[in-house]
């Protein structure tokens, strides 16, 4: 598959990674953008580790409470230095993240945080829904359904609810862009969403 300059540019805009890194990731992923993003994320983690495994011990806790006073969220976003923790972009990202959590109600920050029983429940539902499909393709269909569900419930995979401002980019893409701009490892540590009556 040929990788065009437009493909590289689009990936670079989504991830904030360097041009050559984007091209290499697209080539290795045979043009699959999602796989390329995943590879760049892994590489970004490796780069962070190479920088002396500096811990993300600084950061901020931000909140959002909806105007009706019935829904709210707290988020903790961590970084490496106090300098970045006080940065306007960093704080704005955390505040927008709290708004997103209140609106989108994710289950977990990443796939690892999704309870195994919830994944198994979704698998059982999908297997029942597609029981009439040919046996040889059923596992792929079920896995596709689970992947689609994870995109809905995993914070890093969700497109930000403010689509106008963020042009449909995911929380992970926004986090990666901020990490690229600040030159630091940025970690969404945890969140809690509150809803009256829940």
Image (spheres, grey):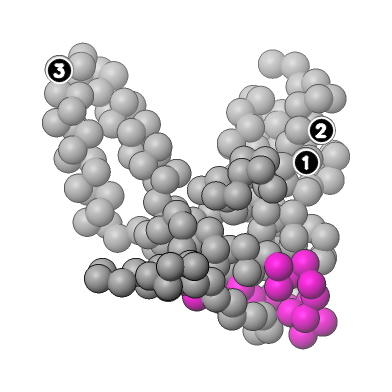
Task: Kindly state the secondary structure of the residue where label 2 is placed.
Answer: helix
Q: Looking at the image, how many numbered discs can be counted on the residues?
A: 3
| Occupied quadrant, residue 20 | top right
Residue shown at 25%/54% (left/top)?
118
Res 56 seen here: no
Distance from the alpha carbon under mark 2 to that under mark 3: 42 Å
Residue 34 located left or right of residue 68: right
Quarter holding the C terminus? bottom left
- Magenta residues (range): 73-92
Mark 3, Cα crowd under 10 Å, few <14 / some 14-19 / many 20+, is: few
The residue that mark 3 highlights is: 132
| Occupied quadrant, residue 5 | top right
Task: Please state which of residues 155 and 54 is positioned toward the viewer in this rendering.
Answer: 155
Residue shown at 74%/54% (left/top)?
177
The residue that mark 1 highlights is: 13
Residue shown at 76%/22% (left/top)?
3
| Occupied quadrant, residue 62 | bottom right
Distance from the alpha carbon under mark 1 to that under mark 3: 41 Å
Q: Which mark is residue 9?
A: 2
Q: Earlier in the sequence, mark 2 or mark 3?
A: 2
Task: Please state which of residues 30 and 146 is positioned toward the viewer in this rendering.
Answer: 146
Q: Are marks 1 and 3 in contact (CB under 8 Å)?
A: no
- Residue 117 painted magenta: no
Task: Please state which of residues 197 and 167 is positioned toward the viewer in this rendering.
Answer: 197
Q: Position of residue 147 (x, y in %)?
A: 39, 39
Q: Position of residue 44 (x, y in %)?
A: 70, 56
Residue 103 located left or right of residue 9: left
Q: Are marks 1 and 2 in contact (CB under 8 Å)?
A: yes
Res 58 seen here: yes
């Amino acid at each position: 598959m040929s990788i065009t300059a437009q493909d590289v540019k689009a990936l670079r805009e989504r991830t904030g990674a360097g041009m050559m890194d984007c091209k290499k990731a697209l080539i290795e992923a045979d043009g699959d953008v999602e796989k390329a993003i995943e590879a760049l994320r892994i590489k970004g983690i490796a780069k962070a580790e190479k920088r002396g495994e500096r811990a993300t011990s600084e950061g901020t806790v931000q909140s959002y409470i909806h105007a009706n006073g019935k829904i709210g969220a707290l988020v903790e976003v961590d970084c490496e230095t106090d300098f970045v923790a006080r940065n306007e972009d960093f704080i704005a990202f955390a505040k927008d993240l709290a708004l997103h959590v209140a609106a989108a109600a994710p289950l977990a920050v990443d796939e690892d945080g999704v309870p195994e029983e919830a994944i198994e429940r979704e698998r059982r539902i999908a297997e029942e829904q597609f029981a009439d499909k040919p046996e040889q393709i059923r596992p792929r269909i079920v896995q596709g359904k689970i992947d689609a569900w994870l995109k809905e419930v995993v914070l890093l995979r969700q497109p930000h609810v403010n689509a106008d401002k963020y042009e449909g980019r995911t929380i992970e893409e926004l986090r990666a862009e901020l990490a690229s701009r600040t030159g630091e490892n940025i970690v969404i540590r945890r969140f809690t969403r509150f809803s009256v009556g829940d």
